[in-house]
Amino acid sequence: MSPLLNPIVWSVILLMGLSIARMNVVLALLCAALVAGVGSGLDLESTLAAFGDGLGGGANIALSYALLGAFAVAIARSGITEWLAARIIARLGRTPAPHQLRLIRTLLLTVLLAAAIMSQNLVPIHIAFIPILVPPLLEVMHQLRLDRRLAACVLTFGLITPYMVLPVGFGSIFLHTQLGPSLAKAGLEIPKGELPLAMLLPAAGMVVGLILAFIRYRKPRDYRPVELPGEEQHAPLSPRNAVVAAIALAAALALQLYSDSIILGALIGFLVFTAGGVVPWRESQDAFTKGVKMMSLIGFIMIAANGYAAVVDASGQVPVLVESVTSGLQSPPLAAALLLLLGLFVTLGIGSSFSTIPIITTLYVPLCLALGFSPLATAALVGSAAALGDAGSPASDSTLGPTAGLNADGQHDHIRDTVIPTFIHYNLPLIATGWLAAMVL
């Protein structure tokens, strides 16, 4: 079968096309799943059954986001969000000098970048910090006239690049739990200490993409005045509210790290706000509902993405696609480029680089060894092919997370303001540096 006739290729193209055309991403995922399933030979009933079976895989993270939304509304009601924004704006003054604006803008983006990087290793909470940290800063971004597309690129960089090269936290899972064992299972043993070295050059492509994003989105962009759910009923920040907020945040973080459960951490944090009187008991239902509403779209996308991934897996067409593209290849440079593009297509659909590795490794490794790629080059090729698409997939945590925070006031479109910018600025440089790593290592 020609690669262009493979149903997975067409389903991914349909997913991206419908999303760019502003169809709801959940509906786009369902349409793409039908194309992938029925096009691969599954009947409609089997396709829908596979989609339904996969939905459960996203339920945990969807509930986590609903509770994080409620927690974020409780934080807003404490008054700390307005206090934080007011303090920063006060430092700017009525007519801030250009150098002051640049300084505060740089400081704000540095905080977002540091938080995203630490969420992958030092405090491994992944995207859970975004609905808590980012919404309070939206008013500051409004005053700074900061382009939120740049903030999305900064957050996505911090969510992806660390796991590619730092073997701690989520990086340990990517390098030592997924990449290393998958390579070994396919017949290629590589010492653990060498895996980060193989991914250094691909990670450099992410740095290039971040620099290009800073250049591309450096100009001011105006938004409407920010109105966050919960702020309309907030009280001025009092010492009691500040203490309750500190206890709630500390309890939520500690319990999540202890139990590895975002659900438990967010639940306890919300209950602390309720017990402390920041969210009166009679108003807790309203606060919780507003939080769930704020995060509902993200949760549904995550659930639907898992259903789509299950259909792709049930179709059995990914190995067929790889074989149809790579059969008869004799040129290492061409093979490296095609393998990277295949990884991009698979990850765009599945939305997870971690899930892509086991799918592609068993097929990539024999081909790479037959074409004379070194072990490190093979590892770089597989790792880069898996990471491709994590930035730029409508269903990826690395794009859904930034949108969850930046769209808290409804002014940041998931596709046009997160997916497309991150796809352009990260996938294209990563293809180039991943290919270069395969050639030089």
Image (tube, rainbow, N blue to C red):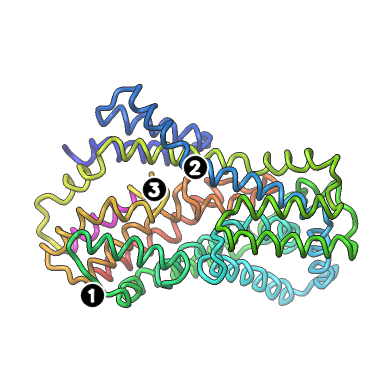
Image: magenta residue range: 333-345
Q: In this image, 117 relative to 219: left or right?
A: left
Q: Residues within 10 Å of mark 1 (few under 14, many from 20)?
A: few
The disc placed on residue 58 is: 2
The secondary element bearing badge 3 is classed as helix
Q: Residues within 10 Å of mark 2 (few under 14, many from 20)?
A: some
User: In the image, residue 127 lies at what x, y percent?
Assistant: 56, 57
Q: Tell me the quadrant of the picture where the N terminus can be found.
A: top left
- Quadrant of the rendered structure where residue 237 is? bottom right
- Quadrant of the rendered structure where residue 372 is? bottom left
Q: In this image, 47 relative to 301: left or right?
A: left
Q: Earlier in the sequence, mark 3 or mark 1?
A: 3
Amino acid type shown at disc 3: Leu
Q: Which residue is mark 3?
A: 348
Answer whether residue 269 is magenta in the image: no
Amino acid type shown at disc 1: Val
Q: Which residue is mark 1?
A: 440
Q: Residue furthest front?
A: 259
Whole-angstrom CA distance, mark 1 to mark 2, is 39 Å
Q: In this image, 202 relative to 76: left or right?
A: left
Q: Earlier in the sequence, mark 2 or mark 3?
A: 2
Q: Earlier in the sequence, mark 1 or mark 2?
A: 2
Is there CB contact under 8 Å for labels 3 and 1? no
User: In the image, residue 130 lies at what x, y percent?
Assistant: 62, 57
